Image (cartoon, grey):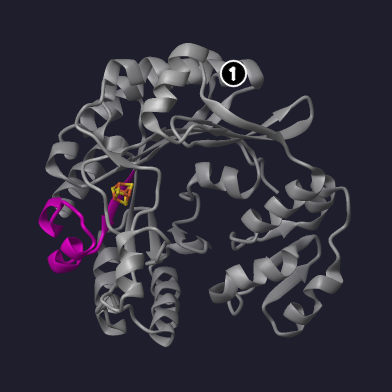
Amino acid sequence: MSDPGFGIYVHWPFCASKCPYCDFNSYVSDNVEHGLWAKALVAELEHNFALRPGGPVSSIFFGGGTPSLMQPRTVGDVIETVHRLWGLTNDCEITLEANPTSVEAEKFKGFAAAGVGRISMGIQALNDPDLKALGRLHTVEEALAALGVAREIFPRVSFDLIYARSGQTVEAWRKELAQALDLAADHLSMYQLTLEPGTPFYELHRRGVLILPDEDAQADMYEITQEMTRAAGLFPYEVSNHARPGAESRHNLTYWQLGDYVGVGPGAHGRLTINGKRVATETEHDPAQWLADVQVNGHSIVQQTELSPMSDGEEYLLMGLRLETGISLARFKALSGTAFDRSRARSLMDDGMVAVDGDTLRVTDKGRPLLNAIIAALVV
Ligand code: SF4
C-alpha cells in the first residue's frame, strides 16, 4: 500500500445560505470577523503541532461550509503556518472547496497566490430549476463561467454533482452526465442525493411532498455513472469519486487509507498518532463557542480519545473498503492486532460481492452499490 500521507483539514463553517439537503456543520452569518478567525486557526494549528510534531504535510484541505467565502489572506496565513510548523512535501496538494458564484470566482487569483493548487467546486446540477430546488444561489451560466476561470488559474479542478434528484429521470441524468464529462478536467465527485435527518428535505420527504426516483431508477443512475465515467477515462477510485489516473484527491486518500490528519476549525475531526497510539480529536461545533475557546485556551478540542486497536481495524475496514483498491489484510492485522476473520466474508465472496486476492480484500463492482450493507456485515 502506498504511503497514506499526512493531511491538514481546515473547517470554514459559514455559508451564504443553507441548502435544504445539507447536514454539514454550516451556518449563515454576515458578521464574521476574519482577522480573529485567521488568528484562531493559526493558534489551533500550533496546538496540534505540539501534540503531533512530525512532518511534512502532504495535503491541506479547506472544507466547509463554504471556504471560498474566506479571505485569501486567511487562507495564506493557514498555509504559511502549516509550512512553518510541519513543512510541506514538494508536491503538497492544497485544495479549497468553492461555490461557483461570480463573487467567489473573483477571489480565485487570490487563493492561487496564497498557495491553493486545486479547487473543488460545488456545481451540483446543470439545469437552473434543479439548482433552485436544491437551494443553490448560482445559475448554470454562472457555474460554467466560474469553472472556466478556475480552469485558467488552478492546475487541478474538480466539481461535484448531485444525482437522483426529485423529478430526475435516468435519461435526464445520462444527458447531464455527458455534459459534465465534456466539462470535466481531471476529477469529478458525484453523490446520490441522501436525505439526512433534521434537514428540510428529510421533512418534506417524510410528508410526501418531496419524491425521489425509486430504487431501480437510482440503481440505474449509479450504473450509468460508473459506465460513462470509465469510458471517459475518469475512473471510480472511490464510491463517489472519479479521476484520471494520478489525479485522485490525495487528501481523501489519506482519510480512506487511515493516515494521520489534523482537524482545525469548528466541528473538525482529526486522527493523530501520539506516542505510537492513534488518537481521535474533535473540536467544538458551534462557531462562536469555538472561537471563544481558542481565544482562551489556544484550541477548542472537546474530545481527545485514544483509539483501541479493534476500533482502528474497524475504521480501516469502514474507510478502506470505499476504495476500489480495497484494503491490505496485513495492515488490518497490524492495526487491529488480529487477523481478518475470513469466515465473515465467506457468503459475500460466494455471492461475488467481495473478493480476496492475495493480501487484498476489496468490494467488487457487483457489490459496490451495496457498499454500506457489505461494510456493516464485515464490521459486526
Ligand atoms: S453550500 Fe455546502 S455546506 Fe453550505 S449549506 Fe450548501 S451544501 Fe451545506
Q: Residue at x 82, y 49 (%)?
A: 336
Count every numbered label the image shows and give the total. Answer: 1
User: Vertical placement of 292 versus 147: above or below?
Assistant: above
Residue drawn 78% across the image and 73% down it? 345
Residue 366: percent from left, percent from top? 59, 80
Q: For disc 1, does the CB lie below 8 Å from ligand 1?
A: no
Rendered view: 251 above or below 126: above
Question: Which residue appears at 68% of the width and 51% of the height?
Answer: 315
| Residue 307 falls left or right of residue 340 | left
Residue 183 appears at what percent x and percent y? 25, 59
- Dividing the picture into quadrants, the one containing residue 346 is bottom right
* Residue beneath the point at 33% across and 16% down: 36
Few, some or many C-alpha atoms within 10 Å of disc 1 (few <14, some 14-19, many ≥20)? Answer: some
Image location (x, y in percent) of residue 90 = 51, 27
Q: Quadrant of residue 29?
A: top left
User: Looking at the figure, which quarter contains the C terminus?
Assistant: bottom right
Provide residue 256's location: percent of width, then percent of height. Answer: 60, 50
Question: Can the viewer see residue 86 in this picture?
Answer: no
Q: Which residue is mark 1?
A: 49
Farthest residue toward the front? 207
In-image side of 134 versus 75 (left or right): left
Q: Magenta span has 143?
A: no
Q: From the viewer's perspective, is 336 left or right of 15?
A: right
- Residue 185 seen in the figure: yes
Q: State the SS at label 1.
A: helix
What stretch of residues is rendered in magenta? 120-142
Between 108 and 31, the one lying in front of the other is: 31
* Three-letter code for the amino acid on which mark 1 is drawn: Phe
